Amino acid sequence: MPIDLVQATSIVVTLLLLEAVLSFDNAAILAVMSRKLPPGAGRKRALNYGLLIAYVLRILAILAAVVLASTPWFLTVGGAYLVFLFMKHFLGMAGGKPHAHATAPDQSATKGFLGLSPLQSVVLQIGLVDLAFALDQVVAAVAFTKNVEPVTFLGGLVTYQQALILVAATAGLVSLRVLAPFISRLMDWLPILEHMAFVAVGFVGALLVLEHPLVVPPLHVITDPLEPVKIPVTLGLFAVPIFIKLVFKVPRGRSHVHAASEKAIDAAQPGPHLPKKP
C-alpha cells in the first residue's frame, strides 16, 4: 500500500511544532535540574544522558499508547486529558495567573540516592520528569495518527503510525537541545503561538471525546467532517498568526519573557574551554 508523503510530512510537521512550543519551558526545567551538579561538562552529560533515557522511555510510552489506542476508553480518557490541559491554560490566563518559567540559582552537587552517584541521580530524575512532561505529546501524537494507513515496516515490527510518531519525537527532542534560543525568540516575537498550541491540543482532544464517548453515542455527525481537515486546521493555527504578523506586524511581541528559560538551558552547557597554558 503506497504511503501518502504529503500526509506523512503534514503529520510530522504538526507534531514537531506542538513538541517545540509545548515543551520549551519543560526543557528549561530539565536544564535547571542538571544545575544541581557543579559547573562544567557534568551538567551537559547529565542533560544529554537524561534526555536519552527520556527518549527511550518515551518510545515505550508511545508503543504502549498505540496499542491502547484500539480501546475506546483510552482514547476517551486521553482526549479528556487534552481538553483539561486546554481549559487549565486558558482559565489560568483568565484568572491572571502569570506564566511560569524555570529559574533556579546554581546549586552544589546533590547527594545521590539508591546508591547512585550525584550524576546518575540527576540523569535518572531528568529521564523520569521528561516522561511525565511527554504525556500530553504522546496522547496528541496518537490522536493525530490514529487513522493513517495500516502499513508495517521491518517485517511487521514497526507500524506506519509508530514510525511517524517516532520521527517527530526524535526531531522534537533534537530541536529542543539545539534550537532552544531560536524557539525562545520565536515565542517572544509571536506569543500567540503558545496559545495556539493549546488550542490545537484542545481541538484534537475534543474530537477524541466526541468520537469515543463512554456513555452517550458517538457524535460522528461532528467528528466525521472534521477528521480529514484535522491536520490542516492545526497547521493553520500556527501558519495564519505567523502570516498576519509578517504582513500586518500584529500582534505585538513581548520583551523576551522567555529569557529566563533560555538562560536556564544555556547554563546547562559547559563553559568555553580556556586554552591550555604552554
Image (cartoon, grey):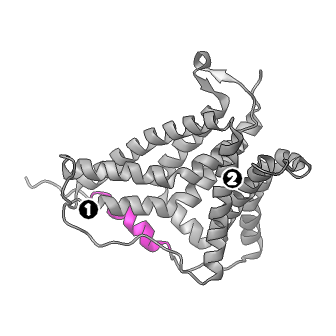
Against 197, residue 92 (above or below) is below
User: Toward the viewer: 135 or 250?
Assistant: 135
Where is residue 145 shown, x and y percent of the image? 70, 40
Read off the residue under disc 2: 79
Q: Is residue 219 above or below residue 57?
A: below
Q: Residue furthest front?
A: 215
- Residue 114 on image: x %, y %: 21, 47
Q: Is residue 269 left or right of residue 193?
A: left
Q: Quadrant of the N terminus?
A: top right
Q: Report the magenta residues as a range.
A: 258-271
**Which residue matches tag 1?**
36
Q: Contact (CB < 8 A) between labels 1 and 2?
A: no
- Most extreme residue toward the right is 221
Query: Which residue is pictured at 18% across the width and 48% down the height?
Result: 117
Query: How many circles with numbers are drawn on the protein?
Result: 2
User: Which one is nearer the viewer's eye here, 272 or 163?
Assistant: 163
Dot 1: few (<14), some (14–19), or many (≥20) neighbours within 10 Å?
many
**Is residue 151 shown in magenta?**
no
Three-letter code for the amino acid on which mark 1 is drawn:
Lys
- Tag 2, which secondary structure? helix
| 265 sits to left or right of 21 | left
Instruction: Tell me, yes or no, if residue 190 can be seen here.
Output: no
**Residue kind at label 2, given as amino acid type:** Gly
How far apart in space, not on screen, are marks 1 and 2 (Cα)? 36 Å
